[in-house]
Amino acid sequence: MRYRDTGNVHKDFHLAMNTSIQYVLRTYGMEFLRELFRRTAQEVYKDIYLSLKRGEWQPLLEHWTYYYDREEGKYTVTKVDGGFIFLVLECPAVRHLKEKQVPLTSDFALQETLINEAWSSGTQFQIRTEILGEGSYRMSVLPRPGRAES
Amino acid sequence: MIPSDHYVRLYNELFKMLGERGQEDLRQYWREISRLQKTILGPFIESDGLRGMYTYWEHIRVEENCKADLKLTEDYFEFRMRKCPSLTKAMDNDAGVYKYYCDHCSGWIAPIMEQYGYHLAYDMISRTEPRCIMRVYKNKEKAEAFLKEARLPARPYGE
């Protein structure tokens, strides 16, 4: 895994994430926000993106399990043929906003939908993000129809 | 979820995108972050002035895993960063660090201090070394005197 943090966690960065999403949408619009997450997915998380292009989903699963565990999120993982389903039951970022009494809007979930969209773009996987409720979502990483198995 | 640990790398990308549009776009964003941060830092300053800043940044030192020393005097509060986790992560980054990454700190802190009648004096030292010295003074002339001696004084709003 390219990045692996230890020590304390400064969860207020989720508040900054929320502010930044709202600010970018209000000031520059959706395409600017989409480009921000594309850069993050494909350039910051270059190793994950290149793995997905090679047909390997394991680095993405390792990244998610490590960081959802680190922030004490609740989730389940179901392996399926050629991919996996990551079901988030309690998102730590949403939990933190609620603890801080920051109003939650549907825009906050754009961090999942847009980064997953960028991770799947041009790779052998489709990543479908379904928002199930406040702090709960399902991310299905599945092979595109017709791709060769890795 | 973008992990808390990785927010600064996304932040770094946003700075690049805003910087491509121009300095004023960066400044407007710093002011937006400043408004958020005021809701967190502001009550510490309101209740206890410089000592409140010490309390806030001591919490930050621990929670953000900073290697830093704090000092409180009659004239100023000092946060002396020996290893900044934020710049360290932005540099340890496959997307590369934004060349003016460090400037955002003074960019969000300065407006808050101004609103409370304090004066920020920030020596970034170097934009490629994860260390800096931040002081907040009660007295403007003393803040300016510190900035004159700084190796790389921060002037986020060009003043």
Image (cartoon, coloured by chain):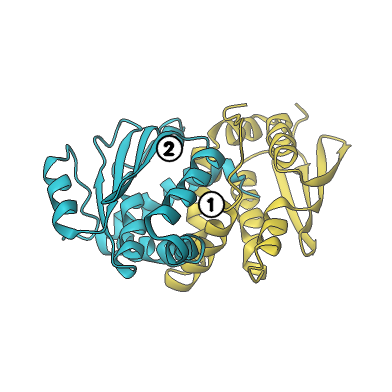
Chain colours: A yellow, B cyan
Chain of the residue that carries numbered disc 1 in the rendered image: A
Q: How many marks?
A: 2
Residue furthest front in the image: B74
Quarter location, residue A102? bottom right
Identified at 58% across, 32% down, the residue is A50
**What amino acid is at disc 2?**
Ala
Q: Residue at x 65, y 63 (%)?
A: A100
Rendered-image quadrant of the C terminus of chain B: bottom left
Labelled disc at residue B90: 2
> Closest to the observer: A9 or A69?
A9
Residue A18, how many percent across, how many down?
A: 57, 62
Residue A32 appears in the rendering: no
Q: Residue at x 12, y 48 (%)?
A: B145
Q: Give how far apart the Cα atoms at labels 1 and 2 are.
A: 16 Å
**Residue B90 picture quarter:** top left
Q: In the image, residue A89 lies at what x, y percent?
A: 83, 53
Image side of residue B119 versus residue A119, left or right: left
Which three-letter amino acid code belongs to the residue tagged 1?
A: Phe
Q: Is residue A73 left or right of residue B106?
A: right
Residue holding disc 1: A37
